[in-house]
Structures are given as C-alpha cells and as structure tokens.
Image (tube, rainbow, N blue to C red):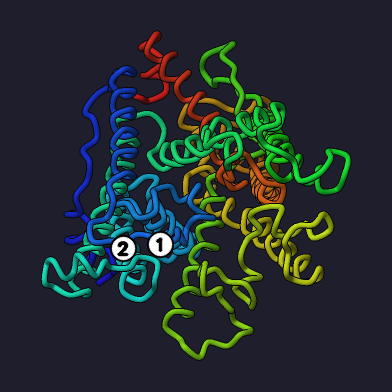
C-alpha cells in the first residue's frame, strides 16, 4: 500500500475553501481582497491574552518577510506556510511524493491536503518552543494567579492562540488565492512592508525623536535636531548619511525600486504563431527574474529557522559551547559563534567599522560573515528558484505542453512538445539561475546599505516585485472584464 492510499482518508478531509463555481466579477474580487486585508490588520492588533509585556520580537529582523506582528495572535505570520513550502519543494524536487499535480485531479487534492497538514504541523513545531522552551513568549504571572491555573496553564492558552492564528492566516491566504486578486502571502508581505515604509517616511515622534525621513530633515533644516558635528566632519557626514539624515537609506530604497521594476521588464521574447489561425501571432516572455522573487522568502525563512534553532539551544542547553553561539543577556541576540556568522547583515552599523559604526567584531570576522551571507543568498536563491520553477509548472517541459495545448507553435519548428521543450531549455534554466542569484545579491546589498523604515532588503524586493505583478494581474482582470470572450480563450471560465 502506497503512502497516498494510506494518507488519502485524512488529506481529502482537510478543511478547504470552496472554489467559485463560475466567474467572479472583478469588483467582488477587490472586495474579498480588501476584506481579508482589513482582517489581517485587525488580527495583528489583537494582543495575546496572558502574555507578559516587555518582550522583544525575535523575528524582528525577518518580520518584513514573515508578516504578522510580535505578541499578536498572528505571532507566527506566514512562517509555517513558507516552511511547509520548503519541505514540499524539497520532497517534490527529489521526486519522493510521486504526485502528478499537473494532470491528476486526485493528486492535486492530495497535494493541497498535504500542504495544509504540514502547515498545522509547522505551527505546532514553531509555536510550542516559543511558548514552552524559550523566553520569546513569556506567560504573565498575574494572569496565572488570577485564573488559578499556574504558568503552564497560561502557556497552554498562549500556544492555543498562536496556533489558531497560524491556521487563520492559512485560510485567509486560500481565500485571497481563490476569491481575490493575487495571493494572500504576497498581500500580507505588501501590507507589513508598506506600513513600515510609510512610518519610515512620515513617522513623527517629535523633531528631536526617532522620526521618519521627512520629519527628521524638517528638524535638521529648522535646527530643532542638531547634528553631532559640522556637516563637513566625519561625525556630521555619518549622521547625515547613516544616522538621522537617512540619506543612504533613501538612496538604497529608491534604487531597489528602480532596479526591480527594470529587471521585471527585461525579458527574452520567444515568437509564437497559431497552427490553425493564419496571422495569429504572439510571444512567450522569459523574464530575467523568471522565478519571481518569491523563492527569496524560502531562503530567508530557512535562515530564520536556523536562528530560531540557536535560540532554543541557548535556552535549553546550559553548557552550550561558545564556538556554537554566545547570546547577549539583555537583548537575547547572538553576538559570537557559528550562529552569529549565519545571521544575515541587517544594517550598515553591523559592518561599516571604517566610518565609526559600533562594530565590536574584528574586520576579518565581519568580512567572513558578509561572505557567508552572500553565498547563502546567491546559491540559495538559485537553488530555490530552480525548485520553484519545477514545482509550479514553469519548467521547459510544462511550458512546452502549455504552448502545445493552446494551439500555438514556434515559427520554423514542428508542432511537437518535445521540439518546443528543447527550445525552452535554451533559455529557462539559465535565466532561472541568473535571476535567482541576482535577486539574492540585491537582497544582501539592500540589507547592508539599509532602507527606509528599517525594512529588510528581501522584504523591499518582495514588496516591489509583488506589487508590480499585482498591477499586471489587475490590468489583466480589467481587460477580461471588458472583453468576456478573452476569459474563454485563457480558460478563466
């Protein structure tokens, strides 16, 4: 008996959001999307009952890509969904699942059920250590005393809440994917990053406080916020570019926007013609960022899980060797050891020792850490891009079959899937690797230079790319709404 026959009774009974039976009007899709977005913001402001205040956000450095909010019912964010996707991609890449998600409806149902089951498992495996085995989420003794259930009882309540939050965000993502525009994962990333960008631009905490870019410069120009020295001195230039002036962060943010939009428009267009309709021509675009930037979520999530593993080992292993990792007693962040080298660079202060930044490590240690981060992101970006293309039906074989089924062919070549596949193999694998490596390099560079609102480079890349694709999808939806016949051509009905 195969694993599919054994697991089928469970996987086919997993709760799911029903697909719409017919065409969903564009306005209704927007309403569903807006409703889920409002619900997301509402849940990020629902504080966990029984949580002791004053804790730090362990996922702070990864929060822009994992969404959610620290101390809220969405504490886990999209982390379990992303981790489950990593596991499925690895299993699918090694061909261990034996599922034909392209042509077999039964296998499609099993795959979706398996994905949901893995997300629930990841919610448990991620949430339980946060509550029971680490100081990330601490139970409030006052609540324990008032309820008379002890700290363990309050911890159980905390765990139940974040488990519910993890399952809620799973179904919110599914609702957006089936009834809304785009994907829920992308929508939540855009929401979180955009909120931090707006705060970084226009945040106001007084002219002399830690305000946004605009208010900081108002304070500098009016003299309400004094620079530590003359603008021509090292201290003054450091404050203008790296400190309260945030000039370098603004330049990096704008540059990332420009580079991603430009990269999205760079493509190789393979000409197509219809085999039966004379004069009907088209093009198949192979973009430079062919696999999109979504595989970057998987790479950063893998780094986040490694850092979480270090936290768990530190809290549970009293004799943890210093070479493995040393942690600051106040902030709880790793400051030395292997886990420090595996921690991604997040700001200029962590490596610019030559301009007076507060870097305590030696220069060679900083360079080694940068090298590891670059290698991890570039190689990991290329590998996960390949997995992403193969598991989402974007590979040469699947693409050739799609072109064949649409009745199109490449001029000058026989109308044969194998022939089309050979043509696609000239471009897709190479572009996939180059695009994945390029996105990894951009993410590290953006992190090192800093961005407005302290958004991570990966988060900014994801936001710009997802927003661009969302714009394209909205334009396509509007076109199909205006010309209903196109929905039949593209199989949307």
The answer to whether residue 425 is visible is no
Name the side, left or right, on which 286 lies relative to 310.
right
Which quadrant is the N terminus positioned in?
bottom left
- In the rendered view, tell whether residue 32 sits above or below residue 309: above
Q: Nearer the viewer, residue 270 or 276?
A: 270
Q: How far is the residue under mark 1 from the one under mark 2? A: 7 Å
Q: Which mark is residue 67?
A: none
Q: From the top left corner, tell me how far across and down residue 440 is, in percent.
A: 66, 51
Q: In this figure, what is the number of numbered marks?
A: 2
Q: From the top left corner, tell me how far across and down residue 249 is, in percent.
A: 69, 40
Residue, disc 2: 52
- In the rendered view, tell whether residue 274 sits above or below residue 8: above
Residue, disc 1: 55
Question: Residue at the location (25% across, 64% down)?
Answer: 159
The answer to whether residue 358 is visible is yes
Q: From the top left corner, tell me how far across and down residue 6 is, in percent.
A: 22, 68
Does dot 1 land on a helix, a strand or a loop?
A: loop
Question: Residue at the location (36% across, 12% down)?
Answer: 484
Q: Are marks 1 and 2 in contact (CB under 8 Å)?
A: yes
Which quadrant is the C terminus positioned in?
top left
Name the side, left or right, on which 331 lies relative to 410.
left
Name the side, left or right, on which 176 lies relative to 376.
left
């Amino acid at each position: 008996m195969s694993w599919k026959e054994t697991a089928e009774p469970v996987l086919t009974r997993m709760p799911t959001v029903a697909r719409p039976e017919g065409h969903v009007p564009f306005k209704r899709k927007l309403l569903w999307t807006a409703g889920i977005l409002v619900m997301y913001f509402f849940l990020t402001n629902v504080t966990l009952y029984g949580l002791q205040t004053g804790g730090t956000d362990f996922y702070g450095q990864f929060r822009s890509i994992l969404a959610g909010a620290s101390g809220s019912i969405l504490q886990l964010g999209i982390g379990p969904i992303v981790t489950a996707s990593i596991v499925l991609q690895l299993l699918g890449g090694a061909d261990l699942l034996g599922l034909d998600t392209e042509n077999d409806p039964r296998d499609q149902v099993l795959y979706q059920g398996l994905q949901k089951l893995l997300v629930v498992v990841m919610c448990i495996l991620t949430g339980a250590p946060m509550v029971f085995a680490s100081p990330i989420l601490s139970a409030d003794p006052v609540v324990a005393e008032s309820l008379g259930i002890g700290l363990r009882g309050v911890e159980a309540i905390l765990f139940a809440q974040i488990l519910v939050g993890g399952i809620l965000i799973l179904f919110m993502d599914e609702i957006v994917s089936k009834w809304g525009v785009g994907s829920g994962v992308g929508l939540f990333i855009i929401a979180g990053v955009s909120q931090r960008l707006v705060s970084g631009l226009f945040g106001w905490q007084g002219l002399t406080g830690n305000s946004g870019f605009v208010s900081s410069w108002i304070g500098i120009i009016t003299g309400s916020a004094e620079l530590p020295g003359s603008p021509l001195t090292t201290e003054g230039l450091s404050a203008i570019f790296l400190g309260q002036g945030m000039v370098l962060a603004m330049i990096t943010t704008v540059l990332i926007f420009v580079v991603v939009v430009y990269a999205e428009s760079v493509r190789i267009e393979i000409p197509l013609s219809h085999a039966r309709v004379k004069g009907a021509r088209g093009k198949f675009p192979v973009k430079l960022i062919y696999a999109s930037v979504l595989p970057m979520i998987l790479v950063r999530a893998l780094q986040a899980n490694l850092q979480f593993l270090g936290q768990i080992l530190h809290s549970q292993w009293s004799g943890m060797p210093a070479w493995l990792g040393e942690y600051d007693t106040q902030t709880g962040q790793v400051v030395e050891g292997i886990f420090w080298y595996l921690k991604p660079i997040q700001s200029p202060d962590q490596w610019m020792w030559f301009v007076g930044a507060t870097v305590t490590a030696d220069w060679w240690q900083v360079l080694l850490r940068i090298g590891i981060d670059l290698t991890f992101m570039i190689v990991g970006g290329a590998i996960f891009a390949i997995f992403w293309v193969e598991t989402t039906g974007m590979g040469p074989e699947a693409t050739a079959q799609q072109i064949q089924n649409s009745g199109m062919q490449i001029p000058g070549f026989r109308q044969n899937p194998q022939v089309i596949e050979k043509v696609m193999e000239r471009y897709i694998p190479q572009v996939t690797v180059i695009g994945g490596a390029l996105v990894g390099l951009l993410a590290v560079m953006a992190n090192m230079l800093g961005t407005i609102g302290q958004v991570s480079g990966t988060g900014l890349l994801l936001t710009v790319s997802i927003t661009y694709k969302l714009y394209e999808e909205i334009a396509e939806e509007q076109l199909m709404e205006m010309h209903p016949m196109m929905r039949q051509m593209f199989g949307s009905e």
